[in-house]
């Protein structure tokens, strides 16, 4: 590998469009004014071409619903031209039509995560606003059954964000999805940077060590939680993926974050990620 490109990302997220069928109250997706609404084909192709052969895990989504992009089958097939690549997607499940399920399974997806925050319609509807409960369950269950019957999915996770509104259903939720043939998981609720009430913590960040993120316009950002372009590190329409990853801007940000200096980065100055994690050389959570 070129000495100037001596490091590579392990994961690359590609925001292929800005569409989402949900209006979840905890997500900034509805507030974004970034444009264009759809990534040009030559942009996502260049990202994949620039990083081909490096063993990258591609996540063709970011602050959007990946199955809202009708090109998703085409995108996954393009990634699959690289024998070293892996594919992961997160979806709310409502748009998993029969055709989309076939395309996802034909792509031999490595990991697919369904975000479903309730076992009952009443609980589900409090967080997944705008998403049809019955359709989501029907299509997700059908996908799990089909995947387990014919293969084509390495790992199927059903994820619930841990919230007061759904805690009473979590045990039954895990039993239900385990019996269905998927892997149920309860994940930590995360508040996005710069949301009301979020205060920064001067701690290191793990997110920037292995992952790379591309907006729909081809710009690369430091973090997938950067909804409003506060920490742009490059532009793939003008630069090679590895030159951005190993560039001065990205390395400068990573150096600051390694020392816990979030206050020196606009985006990170109001981010609380990993606030409950113990880092060597930093006070324990209870003493911060």
Image (cartoon, rainbow, N blue to C red):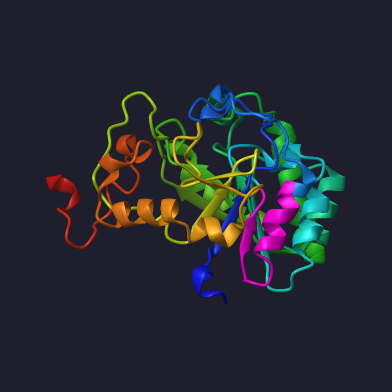
Q: In the drawing, does residue 78 fall left or right of residue 91? A: right
Is 215 included in the stretch rendered in magenta?
Answer: no
Q: How many marks?
A: 0
Q: Is residue 78 above or below residue 186?
A: below
Magenta region, residue range = 43-60
Residue ranking furthest to the right: 99
Q: Quadrant of residue 251?
A: bottom left
Can residue 110 be seen here? The reply is no
Q: Quadrant of residue 109?
A: bottom right
Residue ranking furthest to the bottom: 1
Of residues 173 and 94, the one drawn nearer to the viewer in this rendering? 94
Is 55 included in the stretch rendered in magenta?
Answer: yes
Q: In the drawing, does residue 191 fall left or right of residue 184? A: left
Going 32% across and 34% down the picture, which residue do you hit?
270
Residue 167 percent across, percent down from the top left: 43, 38
Going 82% across and 40% down the picture, which residue do you hit?
70
Q: Is residue 45 above or below residue 272?
A: below
Of residues 25 and 209, the one drawn nearer to the viewer in this rendering? 209
Going 73% across and 35% down the picture, which residue do you hit?
38
Residue 11 percent across, percent down from the top left: 56, 60
Going 79% across and 46% down the picture, which residue do you hit?
41
Residue ranking furthest to the left: 287
Q: In the drawing, does residue 157 fall left or right of residue 136? A: left
Q: Quadrant of residue 267?
A: top left
Of residues 191 and 96, the one drawn nearer to the viewer in this rendering? 191
Residue 35 percent across, percent down from the top left: 65, 29
Residue 56 percent across, percent down from the top left: 61, 66
- Quadrant that contains the N terminus: bottom right
């Amino acid at each position: 590998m070129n000495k100037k490109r001596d490091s590579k990302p392990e994961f690359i997220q590609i925001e292929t469009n800005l569409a989402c069928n949900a209006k979840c109250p905890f997500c900034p997706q509805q507030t974004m004014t970034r444009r264009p609404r759809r990534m040009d084909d030559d942009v996502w192709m260049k990202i994949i071409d620039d990083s081909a052969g490096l063993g990258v895990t591609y996540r063709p989504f970011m602050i959007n619903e990946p199955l809202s992009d009708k090109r998703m089958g085409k995108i996954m097939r393009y990634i699959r031209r690289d024998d070293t690549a892996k594919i992961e997607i997160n979806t709310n499940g409502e748009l998993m039509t029969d055709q989309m399920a076939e395309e996802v399974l034909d792509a031999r997806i490595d990991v697919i995560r369904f975000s479903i925050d309730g076992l009952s319609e009443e609980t589900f509807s409090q967080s997944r606003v705008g998403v049809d409960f019955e359709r989501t369950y029907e299509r997700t269950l059908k996908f799990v059954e089909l995947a387990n019957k014919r293969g084509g999915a390495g790992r199927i996770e059903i994820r619930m964000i841990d919230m007061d509104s759904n805690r009473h259903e979590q045990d039954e939720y895990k039993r239900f999805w385990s019996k269905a043939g998927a892997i149920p998981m309860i994940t930590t609720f995360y508040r996005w940077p710069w949301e009301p009430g979020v205060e920064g913590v001067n701690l290191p960040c793990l997110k920037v060590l292995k992952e790379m993120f591309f907006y729909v316009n081809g710009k690369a950002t430091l973090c997938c939680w950067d909804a409003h372009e506060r920490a742009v590190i490059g532009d793939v329409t003008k630069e090679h993926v590895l030159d951005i990853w190993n560039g001065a801007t990205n390395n400068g940000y990573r150096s600051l974050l390694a020392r816990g200096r979030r206050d020196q980065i606009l985006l990170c100055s109001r981010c609380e990620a990993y606030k409950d994690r113990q880092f060597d050389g930093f006070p324990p959570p209870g003493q911060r």
